[in-house]
Image (cartoon, rainbow, N blue to C red):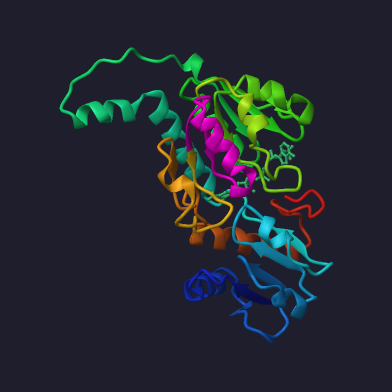
Amino acid sequence: MRITFCSPSARPGPWLEGLRAALPGATVEAWEPGASVADHAVVWTPPQQLFDEQPQLKGIFNLGAGVDALLRLRLPAGAVVVRIDDGGMAVQMAEYVSYWVIRWFREFDAFGAEIARSRWTFRKPLQHADFPVGVMGLGVLGARVARTIAQFDFPVLGWSRTPKDLPGVRNFAGAQQFDEFLAATRILVCLLPLTSETRDIIDARTLGRLQPGGYVINVARGSHVVDQDLIALLDSGHLAGAALDVFRTEPLPAEHPFWNHPKITITPHMSARTLREESIAQIAGKIRALERGEPVAGVVDPNRGY
Ligand SMILES: NC(=O)c1ccc[n+]([C@@H]2O[C@H](COP(=O)([O-])OP(=O)(O)OC[C@H]3O[C@@H](n4cnc5c(N)ncnc54)[C@H](OP(=O)(O)O)[C@@H]3O)[C@@H](O)[C@H]2O)c1
């Protein structure tokens, strides 16, 4: 069995060593133009040329949860596309979202500003009931986030394409229940995949339907958010703040207004990183299962877009 590896942003050495150790007997090599034909490809943002030269591929393993960039390429018709499911990312997302929800709810910024002026102040505690958290996308990552936030006693709502029954979460599904979900939400968390249905979904209409004093946490893809609509709703006072980890263009261009907006905090696409050891173990397990003809988790439906 031959595996080709291509991730222009990663140092290939440790990945190749890890995959060789996890798949004894397999030939694992870094892809380069004209490389020998492989059975499976392990990739992150590969060039179109890889797939043009390797039409025989049986499996394409994406080194991340989001496959929007991969699905924009022309992929071999017979190849199954598999993404990382969780692989240590769910707990990172739960940490990132909890951090923001708690920072806003416990007013750490307001206390910090007083402490910076050497002032010992009292603030009346806020009520969990006034901070309902709505999670868009209840997949591997969104479900973990919803569960975690519910443990802090916040009311939690979830919205997905198909109906779910997550304990402790008020579940909404489909376009027909979207407005009801938004009206019950104050802190909106985006963990949707980027598809033709979800692009630009966080626009003026969506944001305007959130409860007043709302917040946005986008940890999915930058193209879910209409940047100028978010800024307008923050400036109007309808929204109180936003934490953004992902952007339409990354790195975020130096002149982009998000950098210096007083109500926006940005992070450089770090909310949930692909962890090498966990990912190698997961991919190796899935390659072995596919070779045995067994089903694997995390198979992408190209028509659905995730
Ligand atoms: N910032 C980062 O560092 C980072 C890291 C990893 C992932 N991500 C992003 O997080 C996304 C989610 O990852 P995941 O592993 O949780 O994905 P997933 O398991 O595929 O879950 C996707 C969820 O979104 C829902 N959904 C899809 N289309 C929808 C629509 N049109 N309307 C309503 N709900 C819809 C799905 O509904 P159903 O359950 O009904 O199918 C599912 O609940 C990835 O696609 C990626 O873009 C970001």
In-image side of 21 versus 162 (left or right): left
Q: Position of residue 43 (x, y in %)?
A: 63, 67
Q: Is residue 34 above or below residue 295?
A: below
**Hey, which residue is sitting farthest left in the picture?**
118
Magenta span includes 237: yes
Q: Image quarter for residue 108?
A: top left
Residue 148 position, x and y percent, is: 51, 31
Query: Is residue 81 in view?
Result: yes
Asked which quadrant contains residue 220, the reply is top right
Q: How many marks?
A: 0
Q: Residue at x 47, y 46 (%)?
A: 257
| Depicted 221 relative to depicted 120: above or below | below
Q: Is residue 190 left or right of residue 36?
A: left
55 vs 125: above or below: below
Residue 69 point in image, percent of width and height: 67, 60
The magenta stretch is 214-242
Figure quadrant, ligand 1: top right
Q: Position of residue 222 (x, y in %)?
A: 59, 48
Res 170 seen here: no
Q: Is residue 305 magenta?
A: no
- 235 sits to left or right of 58: left
- State the quadrant of the N terminus: bottom right
Seen at 67% across and 46% down, the residue is 193
